């Protein structure tokens, strides 16, 4: 684990494959995310993309490209620096715990 960086290309590309399991690379991993969480997840994504665009976030700016890239970028952050993500973005951290079925 990289103690300082939040980037990991292997995780990024793997998350795109996970995202694609439902037939669309759209940032919503319907195979892993219960239907009840889809709309809240999309709202959370859009809120954070706005923060990135306004330079009010430490999430990689590439995540503001679209929902699919946001999911991949924030997943890198989740696996590389879970401590920092939990501290700075607790709601994202909790949803990603559900998506990836992690038990911290």
Image: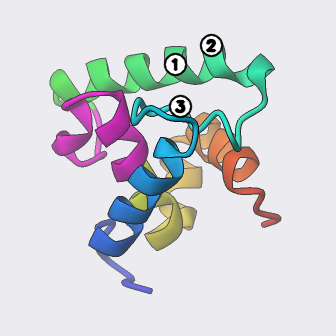
Q: Are marks 3 and 2 in contact (CB under 8 Å)?
A: no
Report crowding for label 1: few under 14, some 14 to 19, many 20 or more residues within 10 A (C-alpha): some
Taking 83 as reference, is 25 left or right?
left
Kindly tell me whether residue 22 is visible in this rendering: yes
Hey, which quadrant is residue 25 in on the image? Answer: top left
Q: Quadrant of the N terminus?
A: bottom left
Q: Position of residue 13 (x, y in %)?
A: 34, 62
Mark 3 and mark 1: Cα distance apart in space: 8 Å
How many numbered discs? 3
Dot placed on the residue nearer the N-terminal end, 3 or 1: 3
Instruction: Relative to 36, say whether 4 is above or below.
Output: below
- Please name the residue shown 18% across and 41% down the image: 61
Mark 2 and mark 1: Cα distance apart in space: 5 Å
Q: Are marks 3 and 1 in contact (CB under 8 Å)?
A: yes
Mark 2 — residue? 39
- Please name the residue shown 51% across and 68% down the image: 79
Q: Position of residue 74 (x, y in %)?
A: 41, 49
- Please name the residue shown 31% across and 77% down the image: 4
- Checking the image for residue 28, the label placed there is 3
Mark 1 — residue? 42
Q: Which residues are magenta?
A: 57-73
Taking 34 as reference, is 82 left or right?
left
| Residue 8 is a magenta residue | no
Q: Are marks 2 and 1 in contact (CB under 8 Å)?
A: yes
């Amino acid at each position: 684990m990289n103690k300082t960086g939040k980037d990991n290309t292997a995780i990024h590309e793997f998350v795109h494959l996970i995202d694609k399991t439902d037939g669309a690379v759209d940032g919503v991993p319907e195979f892993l995310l219960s239907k009840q969480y889809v709309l809240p997840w999309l709202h959370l994504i859009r809120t954070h993309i706005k923060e990135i665009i306004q330079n009010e976030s430490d999430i990689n700016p590439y995540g503001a490209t679209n929902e699919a890239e946001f999911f991949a970028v924030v997943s890198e952050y989740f696996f590389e620096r879970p401590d920092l993500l939990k501290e700075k973005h607790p709601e994202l951290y909790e949803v990603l715990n559900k998506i990836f079925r992690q038990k911290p």
